[in-house]
Image (cartoon, rainbow, N blue to C red):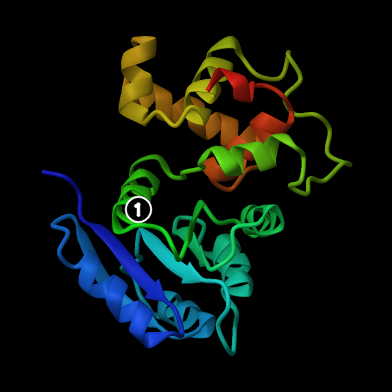
Amino acid sequence: MSKTIKIILADDEELFRKGIYFLLQREKNIEIVFEASNGNEVIEYLKKTDNYPDIILMDLKMPVVSGIDATKIIHKEFPIVKIIALTSYNTKAFIANMINVGASSYLVKSATPKEMIDTINKVAQKGFYYNDAVLQVIQDDIIATDKSIVNLFDQEYLTVREKEVLELICMQFSTHEIAEKLSISSRTVEGHRNNLLLKTESKNIAGLVVYAIQKKVVVLENF
């Protein structure tokens, strides 16, 4: 039986938010645990609860505290929570900004219900979901990186196995799938993944993928 995905919906447009609510509540593996009309309501909820959501569907344009600012705070203080950014815009600048503030994926509001549900499931399973447009933006170096950081992806810094795991992570394989491909246990894969996060100072898998592509440890054409 698949794990229930706990969701927070954050959007100041009530009609749109309720539409998503009624759509998602029909999914057997999804539970809506909270609704918010601005970023501050989301942050206050997270501060008071011990039962964190798996994913927040976060509109970026909201009053009081915007979705962008809320994502920055949540990414720092509650890194276990994944954020899927919601927006009406689908530009390179938006994509870059979305990744910079720590979102694990994004959806344009014109997406189909199937696209939204697929994205939620992929982020819940793998920690992130970047489509071709996002991967291209990352490769084009539009994403801001700290140029003062030493290249942590030096050939001698990562082990051969860590590089293999990293490439499969970037190809969006799950822990179980990576374990099968490399003939190792899921726990071993998790150990390699944790080492990669520590070595790259990434807070989550999404950040790890950004660094891996920009440092050219993986090649986009191979995906």
Q: Position of residue 51 (x, y in %)?
A: 31, 68
Q: Position of residue 176 (x, y in %)?
A: 31, 26
Instruction: Inspect this view and state whether residue 184 appears.
Output: no
- Residue located farthest toward the bottom when viewing the structure as drawn: 64
- Residue located farthest toward the left when viewing the structure as drawn: 1
Q: Residue at x 54, y 68 (%)?
A: 88
Q: Is residue 51 above or below residue 105?
A: below
Residue 219, quarter of picture: top right
Residue 71, quarter of picture: bottom right
Q: Residue at x 32, y 65 (%)?
A: 7
Horizontal side, residue 36 vs residue 135: left or right: left
Q: Position of residue 37 (x, y in %)?
A: 44, 86
Residue 24, quarter of picture: bottom left
Q: Which residue is mark 1?
A: 120
Instruction: Inspect this view and state whether residue 14 appears.
Output: yes
Tag 1: amino acid: Ile
Q: Is residue 125 above or below residue 193?
A: below
Residue nearest the viewer, comparing 163 with 171: 171
Query: Quadrant of the image for the N terminus?
Result: top left
